[in-house]
Image: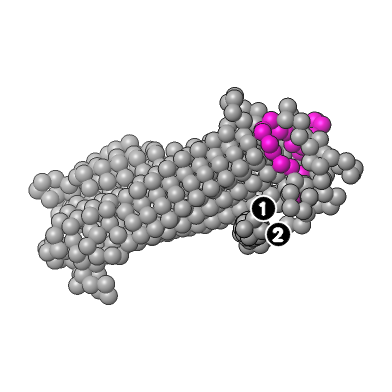
Amino acid sequence: MNKKSQLGILVTGIIILFLSINTIPATTSFSIINQKDNRLNFVLSSRPSRLLDLSLVPHLAIEITHDDNFTDYGLPGLGTKEDPYVIENYNITTTSDKGIYITGTTKYYIIRNCYVDADRTGIFIDSTNYVVGDTNIVNNTCTQNRYYGIHINWSVGANVTNNTCTYNGYHGIMDTSRDSVIINNICNNNDCYGIYLWGSSNAIVSDNTCKENSNGIYLEGTSNLELTHNIFTSNINGICLWRCSYNTLIDNICSENRGEGIETAMSSWIKMIENICDNNGAGIYINDGDSNNLTANVVTNNKRKGICLTNSASVMLYGNTCKNNSLGIEIINSSDFCLVTYNVLEENVKYGVSIGESIETDNPRNNTIHHNTFIKNNLNGTSQAFDEGKHTTWYEELINEGNYWSEWRSKNPYPIDGNANSTDPYPLSKKLEKISYEIIMIIPSFFLMVAFYCTKRKRKTIT
């Protein structure tokens, strides 16, 4: 056989191999196993298929435990804030526990545009808190890791931006640090949580998409966190907070989650502003949380409840819209001293507001409901509201104004269903105009100032 024939057979074989790789069924893919002799061998696995990015350079797992290791790997950069070390454009598909592991360093670095598929964790940053903001993880894909896509542990000011973390065994992104910035990441189809923050503080979590996880985002023991402009859809629960405090949730979308859109437990001083909770099992569920503030949220088409407060005290609901839910707002189980005002309760199947009617013997007490708009709730019943609480006030005592009830044209008190035999003695004749949440937020401060002034005058008169 001459050389031309041999060359032709070789080229034909390469073409057949290439075509066979690209016609493998979608349920099959190639993994690269790193052997001790540094050879790269392709093996078949049953993981979801992926396109091989030929621009990425196959690389063994990277482990950096000392500043000198950056130069040992021949990485470009000086390790300064202006010129960080760069780990870039690698395909790290490995049986090692971690694809990229960095700990105990004092240098600035950036991990950028890498594909990481390791045995346990794709990118693991551990205790690099000697320098604030030294860690930058940008535009990476971390998939099919048995534990986490990206794990930031005990670091300060990490920047995690534009990454895709999918099909990981536990969480897409896990953060147990402070001052982290987690922006514009996609965390879908992870077995547990899309994003999980534990014991974190002062973090900013913004513009992320978490879909088809157990929970879109789970916050445990976090404080002073800002959660803004994220999308949580088709999870079991969208947003979950457990034992958190002073967190702010603004303009997040929680839709088509099978459980709750937003759920908090044992969490206090939480602000929820202008979030959208649509077509979930329940919209917003507050359990065992005090001094929370829900303002200008839109809660619609939820299968059970729009907003539910249980075992919670001093919760303020301002300017929320609860429409087309099974039940608009429910206050149960020792939820005391809550204020519900300037909300729109419209076309909910059952009541617009329901107080009590729980299995607990200690029903809610001293709640105040006024200046709300009730439109076509509980159409098959006799009242748009229900009350079995103790000492519920259905009007504003300072100015003797109650709520607007769409079917009521009388100046007589509006009857409220329930064994409390409550009424709204001062029903409003006109539907309230919608006001911005900035104005609404002034109302509590105004009444606190009035109360303080009256108390001061009273003490002065006594003396």
**Alpha carbon of mark 2 to alpha carbon of mark 1: how far?**
7 Å
Q: Which residue is mark 1?
A: 319
Looking at the image, tell me whether mark 2 or mark 1 is earlier in sequence order. Answer: 1
Q: Residues within 10 Å of mark 2 (few under 14, many from 20)?
A: few
- Indicate the secondary structure of the residue bearing disc 2: loop
- Residue 284: in magenta span: no
Residue 349: in sight, yes or no? no
Q: Position of residue 294 (x, y in %)?
A: 59, 50
Residue at 82 percent across and 31 percent down: it is 382
Q: To which quarter of the image does residue 74 belong?
A: bottom left
Q: Position of residue 134 (x, y in %)?
A: 27, 65
Badge 2 vs badge 1, beta-carbon distance below 8 Å: yes
Residue 430: in sight, yes or no? yes
Q: To which quarter of the image does residue 148 belong?
A: top left
Residue projecting furthest to the right: 410
Above or below: residue 333 compared with residue 36: above
Residue at 43 percent across and 56 percent down: it is 224
| Nearer the observer, 378 or 429 | 429
Q: Quadrant of the C terminus?
A: bottom right
Q: Please, what is the three-letter code of the amino acid marked with disc 1?
A: Gly
Residue projecting furthest to the left: 37
| Nearer the observer, 397 or 89 | 397
Q: Which residues are magenta?
A: 371-394
Image position of 420 (left or right of 409): left
Q: Which residue is mark 2?
A: 435
Image position of 63 (left or right of 426): left
Residue at 64 percent across and 46 percent down: it is 339
